[in-house]
Amino acid sequence: MSGATRRFGIRAWLFGVAVAATLPAVLLAGYVGSLWAESERNAQSEQLARRSEAMATAVARRLESASATLVAIAESEAMQRDDFKLVHAHASRLLRRPNSGAAVVLAARDGTQVFNTRWPFGTALPSAHMATLDPVFASGQPYVSDLFTTPSASIPVTTVNLPVVRDDRVAYALRLSLEPSVLTAVLREQKLPSDWIGVLIDRSGTIIARTHAAETYVGHKGVPELLEAAASGERGWYRVVVKEGVAMQAAFSKVPSVGWTAAVGVPEATLEQPLRDSVRVSAVAAVVLLIAGFAAAWLAARAIETQAGALVGAAKALGRGSTPALPTASVREFQDIGAAVLVAADLLRVRESEREFERRTALVAKAEAEMANAAKSRFLAAASHDLRQPFQAMRLFYEVLLPHVNERGAVAAARLNDAMHAGEDLLSSLLDVSTLDAGTIKVSIEMFAISEVLSRVAAECELQAEEKGLRLRWVPCSATVISDRVLLARMLRNLVVNAIRYTDRGGVLLGCRRRGDSLMLEVWDSGIGIAESHMPHLFEDFFQIQNSERDRSQGLGLGLAVVARMGRLLGHAVTVRSRPGHGSVFAVALTCSEAPPRFSQTSGSQPCDNA
């Protein structure tokens, strides 16, 4: 709704209050929920880190267990006696325990396998895999290998290698092979959640064991993110898309003293589940609170609207002037408003009585004033002849005395003549107004040629224009109009005299214009013009422009007032348009009695349409 203030009902306001009251609670619930979700996420992240460390520790313990088995074999009495057949039998019994290993091998420095528990003792065996044994012979220290495939069994294994010393020299290397399934069992013993993934990679980045799809991915390189993270330090975090295509957050830890890396990953969806649950709970809470708030607002608005409607009805009754009926309100403020309405009703009755008394008093005063004004106007109209009589006598005495005055007396006589003319003009104007107000003027409507009025008024005012150095012109017109010939001439004469009075240079032009069914009788001048602020007062009694000293030689300011009164009497609209400093145009709308007028052009004159 353009240009107006949009207003809402109480129901909309209460709904807005319900929303405003619910919103902070919902935001607070959402904020608390987000804190809780963040806490849960951090807790899961911490648990993830602990699980990766626990997995690395479990792998280290399994390697230590394998190393302890080798130590027991190496320090056995049979090994000390080089009774390799008995050592073979003893090692074979040890490997019968679950997850103990794939095979025990004793190899000499040249790579010859003294025995291998995969085959009976005394079987001809190929040379051992020296890449995993050379570090033992070179350093004399135990060594855990990365994942490799044995030439004899063609299966991927990792080995725990232990030196066997003879005469302060490493004579043999005792090796225990561990298949990936053994280490995968170690990972699964950590009992990770079903959607978590645990993985173990060796120093080269090859997957040794995995909790999910181990048979598919063991022996393959780990994902680049894991390899990059494993090279960055002992433990840490990384984001990864695992081989199954699932985005995960993962933590890793190095297996102590081995250089392997154990990593545990949790799906990002699992980490974000608490946040989603929090958002879901907040949304449900918001909907429930809004529904409850809207229901309460609707009930409250219904009660308020009912009581407000009663007050509206009371206000309308008060406007009609009848006594308002107010039901009992349950809202204290409405009770106060109702009481105020009743008080206002009493005050309005008192004010109405006072206004009625004042109206009657004013009507009586107005009637008395109108009667007095009418009596005054009738008196002046009736006494107009008697009021003009002294001036006529003075004029007669002036004419008799004029031949008998000397030169000094002639100056005084001229001033006396001017004073008599001014007095006669003032009296004539006052008597004209009084006569018009008294309604004693008789109107004689007839058809006549407008040129008769134009020529006569122009002739009467020509001398006055010449005395001011102005040029008075009129444009003949053949139109016939319907009006009062005498009153119309007086109207036009007043307009021309007014134009001459306020024009210092240029001239005054009289003419006619056809406007539809009317003929516009116009008086143009090149005088001082009329300011816009003076327009509303132009036809008021005694209003004059540029006569603040009230110089009576410039008249009383009744000329245009008389024109307005005569225009109303004859039914002729009088209009004016003006530009200050450029002149004015006064127009009187007349009724034509024939077809549109035909303008004729004479020497020194031109049609008003071209003026």
Image: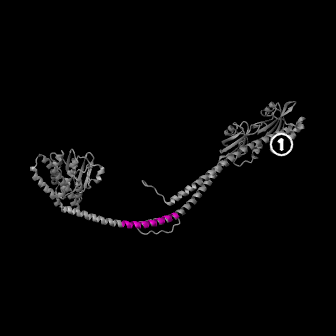
Query: Which residue corresponds to the image point at 19% horizontal and 61% vertical from the top-left?
Result: 381
| Quarter-of-image position of residue 62 | top right
Number of disc labels: 1
Q: Is residue 254 above or below residue 328?
A: above
**What percent of the width, then of the height, locates residue 36?**
65, 50
Q: Is residue 484 above or below residue 249?
A: below
Foreground: 103 or 588?
A: 588
Is label 1 in a helix, a strand or a loop? helix
Local packing at callout 1 (Cα closer than 10 Å; few below 14, some 14-19, many 20+) is some
Residue bearing the label numbered 1: 95
Foreground: 3 or 500?
A: 500
**What percent of the width, then of the height, locates residue 256?**
76, 38
Q: Is residue 125 above or below residue 559?
A: above
Foreground: 83 or 121?
A: 83
What's under tag 1, amino acid-wise?
A: Leu
Q: Which residues are magenta?
A: 332-356
**What percent of the width, then of the height, locates residue 493?**
19, 53
Magenta highlight: main SS: helix
Query: Which residue corresponds to the image point at 10% horizontal and 50% vertical from the top-left?
Result: 402
Q: Quadrant of the N terminus?
A: bottom left
